[in-house]
């Protein structure tokens, strides 16, 4: 009996030695230590042994069982460890692997310049308004003192949708829309950026669609000197403290008097160069004192209130500020152009 047990142990240990994995270990546990295994069988037969033999065989059985169990436990632990190790190895993340580069967008230079201009005027207490790009003839012309058949309409021929509806030719209609909405209240102090449309021959400085920023101030006692001071403040913040302005008499049906405003050339500082065509000055906007008829039509008594207005071309300002030589660069989506503004 003892020899049989010893042989069993040897067999078991040999088989355990060759076990390839946890599953096989489990099978061997069942085979040797399970209910139908040889050890259990021996234990069951203990009753038939003599009183002297029983404790001796009992001891051997326990030893054999313990030996097999010890090996199974040790091997189980070893297999588990190996499994964890290989899992760790497989799941390792190489943190030194370079990431995939993300393409960063940039603010379009026109949007950037609009934001800069808005910031300057908001700093002076203005609010930013918007108006529709498809506009009624009344707001675009009529209420701006440009009645049907007025010759000044020729300069702003547009794309008509119907007789009464057109793509707005300037942002000035927002002046009228704002005054109507304010219903005679003051102060009115707004700027309005937006796209405008004109029949035009496109070239390096002209486009059938471009961007303007309109300004309008109405209150009691607003004077030409307020317009001048406001614009000087604006250009010095936009182009630098050394910048000066010059007002030239002009004509717009919606202002009286009217003036075109030039800034000292940022390229040469006013001494004359190619950019300013040797004049030292660059035109940036049209402006004037709001015409009494315009105030009246929009519900403001011109005997009580006065105001100034201006309209500037955003592309022109962006071209001066960033030394851009062709207005078409703004619209053609050439990445070589746009990427230069990633950090502006
Ligand atoms: N609307 C004019 C244009 O597009 C520009 C302009 C001139 C706007 C004088 C004004 C202004 O508000 O007062 O040519």
Image (cartoon, rainbow, N blue to C red):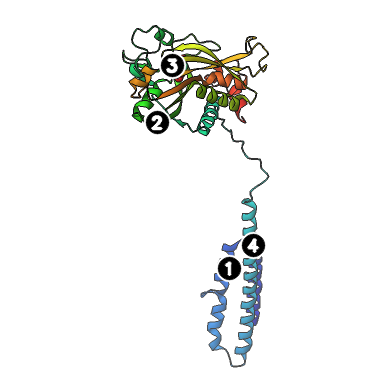
Mark 3: give few (<14), some (14-19) or many (20+) Cα within 10 Å.
Answer: many
Which is nearer the N-term, disc 1 or disc 4?
1
Q: Is residue 237 visible?
A: yes
Q: Secondary structure at mark 3?
A: strand
Q: Which mark is residue 255?
A: 3
- C-alpha gap between disc 4 and disc 3: 89 Å
Corner quadrant of residue 13? bottom right
Residue that numbered label 4 is attached to: 81
Find the distance from the CA under tag 1 to the CA under tag 2: 97 Å
What is the crowding at mark 1: few (fewer than 14 residues within 10 Å), some, or many (at least 20)? many
Of the 4 image quadrants, the one containing the C terminus is top right
Q: Is residue 339 left or right of residue 286?
A: right
Q: Nearer the viewer, residue 115 or 203?
A: 115
The residue indicated by pointer 2 is 186
Between marks 1 and 2 in the image, the one whose residue lies nearer the viewer: 2
- Determine which residue is flagged by label 1: 28
Please tell me whether mark 4 or mark 3 is closer to you in this view: 3
Residue 87 spot, x, y in % from top left: 61, 55
Earlier residue among tags 3 and 2? 2
Ligand 1 within 8 Å, label 3 CB: yes
Please tell me which residue lies in front, 157 or 29. 157
Mark 1: secondary structure: helix
Circle nearer the N terminus (1, 2): 1
Q: Are marks 4 and 3 in contact (CB under 8 Å)?
A: no
x%, y% of residue 174?
40, 24
Foreground: disc 1 or disc 4? 4
Q: CA distance from mark 3 to mark 2?
A: 19 Å
- Label 2 packing within 10 angstroms: few (<14), some (14-19), many (20+): some
Is the CB of the residue bearing disc 2 within 8 angstroms of ligand 1? no
Circle nearer the viewer, 2 or 4: 2
């Amino acid at each position: 009996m003892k020899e049989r047990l010893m042989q069993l142990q040897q067999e078991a240990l040999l088989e355990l030695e060759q076990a390839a994995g946890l599953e096989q270990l489990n099978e061997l546990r069942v085979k040797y230590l399970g209910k139908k295994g040889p050890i259990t069988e021996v234990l069951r037969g203990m009753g038939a042994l003599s009183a002297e033999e029983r404790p001796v065989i009992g001891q051997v059985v326990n030893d054999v069982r313990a030996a097999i169990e010890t090996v199974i436990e040790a091997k189980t632990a070893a297999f588990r460890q190996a499994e964890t190790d290989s899992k760790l190895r497989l799941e390792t993340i190489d943190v030194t692997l370079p990431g995939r580069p993300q393409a960063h967008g940039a603010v379009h230079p026109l949007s950037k310049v609009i934001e800069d201009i808005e910031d300057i005027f908001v700093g002076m207490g203005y609010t930013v308004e918007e108006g529709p790009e498809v506009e009624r003839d009344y707001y675009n012309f009529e209420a701006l003192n440009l009645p049907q058949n007025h010759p000044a309409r020729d300069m702003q021929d547009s794309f008509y949708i119907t007789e009464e509806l057109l793509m707005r030719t300037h942002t000035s209609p927002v002046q009228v829309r704002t005054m109507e909405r304010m219903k005679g209240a003051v102060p009115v102090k707004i700027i309005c950026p937006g796209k405008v449309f004109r029949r035009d021959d496109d070239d390096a400085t002209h486009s059938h669609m471009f961007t303007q920023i309109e300004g309008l101030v109405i209150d009691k006692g607003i004077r030409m000197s307020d317009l001048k001071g406001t614009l000087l403040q604006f250009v010095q913040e936009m182009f630098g403290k050394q910048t000066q302005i010059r007002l030239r008499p002009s004509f717009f049906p919606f202002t009286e008097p009217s003036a075109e405003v030039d800034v000292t050339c940022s390229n040469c500082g006013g001494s004359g160069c190619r950019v300013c065509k040797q004049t030292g000055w660059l035109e940036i906007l049209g402006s004037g004192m709001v015409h009494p008829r315009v105030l009246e039509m929009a519900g403001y008594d011109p005997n009580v209130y006065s105001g100034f207005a201006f309209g500037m071309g955003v592309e022109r300002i962006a071209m001066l500020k960033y030394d851009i030589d062709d207005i078409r660069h703004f619209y053609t989506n050439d990445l070589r152009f746009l990427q230069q503004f990633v950090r502006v």
